[in-house]
Amino acid sequence: MLILILEGLLIGCLLGLTGAGGGILAVPALMASQDWSVALAAPVGLLAITIAAFISVIQGLIKKNIRYKAAIWIALLSIPSAKYGIYLAHIVPPVWLTLIFSLVMLYVGGRIFFNRVDEQNDAHCLINTETGKFIWNTKTALIFGGIGVITGLLTGMLGVGGGFIIVPALRKFTNLNMKSIIATSLMVIFCIGSISIFINVWNGFQYPKEISVVFIFSCVIGLLIGRLITHYISNKTIQMLFSSVVIFVALGLISSVLIELNVI
């Protein structure tokens, strides 16, 4: 049980600090510590990450650093495209999908790691400096819609959360600071996760109560710790931490693919 608590604290903290990494780390962690199959670990991990993200969403809405319209729009567009992602996953071998995704993650992580966080002068979706909200137009709607479609496709194909896609995309196309990007990403994760949980419950999935409660509680506490830490570190530090997590996870995925292909 101690290992489960430590896993939840670490995953929640990373989620709070970076706005990503929850789902893709929670599932293998639960599989390793509880000796579960992915079919059992994925719904429990998703439940914990979604509830933890919900706590952060409440904080973000109170502090007004979530761009909720953008988050809802991205989530709405990602849900239907996830169905096509699931369809593609049955056509393309999963091992090659994972390899492609991990290489993209490695590229994105490297770009973010070596670039400055405030190099956003060419942002396409701009914040109104007077209201602090996005200036909505056709271009803004199309870009956020595109982020949603791609997020849904990759989520459906690979079963990963959207944070690894949403955070770099918002950083590239908007002039939001990293703290607002993370908060907005967490709201998208909450929206998508809520739909998935509803589907799991509707299909009759039975959550193991004791383990689920402990893991959820640990993730929530970890996320609150992570969000608290963000008040004391710079945007540049958050950027470096996020990119490091992305690179670490990408290398782990590449290793698993190479093992499956009997290369190593």
Image (cartoon, rainbow, N blue to C red):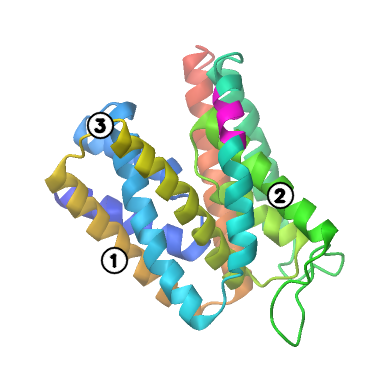
Mark 1: give few (<14), some (14-19) or many (20+) Cα within 10 Å.
many
| Spot occupied by residue 154 in the image (x, y as percentages of width and height) | 60, 35
Q: Is residue 94 left or right of residue 227?
A: right
Residue at x 71%, y 67% (from the top left corner): 117
Q: Secondary structure at mark 1?
A: helix
Task: Give the left or right position of residue 113, taking residue 75 as reference.
Answer: right
Q: Which residues are magenta?
A: 81-86
Q: Amino acid at mark 3?
A: Gly
What residue is pinned by disc 1? 221
- Kindly identify the amino acid type of the residue bearing the numbered disc 1: Ile
Q: Nearer the viewer, residue 87 or 226?
A: 87
Rounded to the nearest angstrom, the CA distance separating label 1 from label 3 is 28 Å
Quick one: label 2 or label 3, which is nearer the N terminus? 2
Of mark 1 and mark 3, the one earlier in the sequence is 3
Which residue appears at 49% of the width and 75% of the height?
61
Q: Earlier in the sequence, mark 1 or mark 2?
A: 2
Which residue is the site of mark 3? 204
Q: Is residue 149 visible?
A: yes
Q: CA distance from mark 2 to mark 3?
A: 32 Å
Residue beneath label 2, please? 145
Q: Nearer the viewer, mark 1 or mark 3?
A: 3
Judge whether residue 60 is colored magenta: no
SS class, disc 2: helix
Vertical arrangement, residue 113 with respect to residue 126, above or below = above
Measuring from the top left, give residue 40's x and y in whole percent: 27, 31
Secondary structure under tag 3 reads loop
Q: CA distance from mark 1 to mark 2?
A: 32 Å
List the single residue furthest toward the front: 202
Residue 66 x/y as whole percent: 57, 71
Q: Compared with residue 216, is residue 81 higher up or lower down, i.e. above or below? A: above
Can you tell which mark lies on residue 198?
none
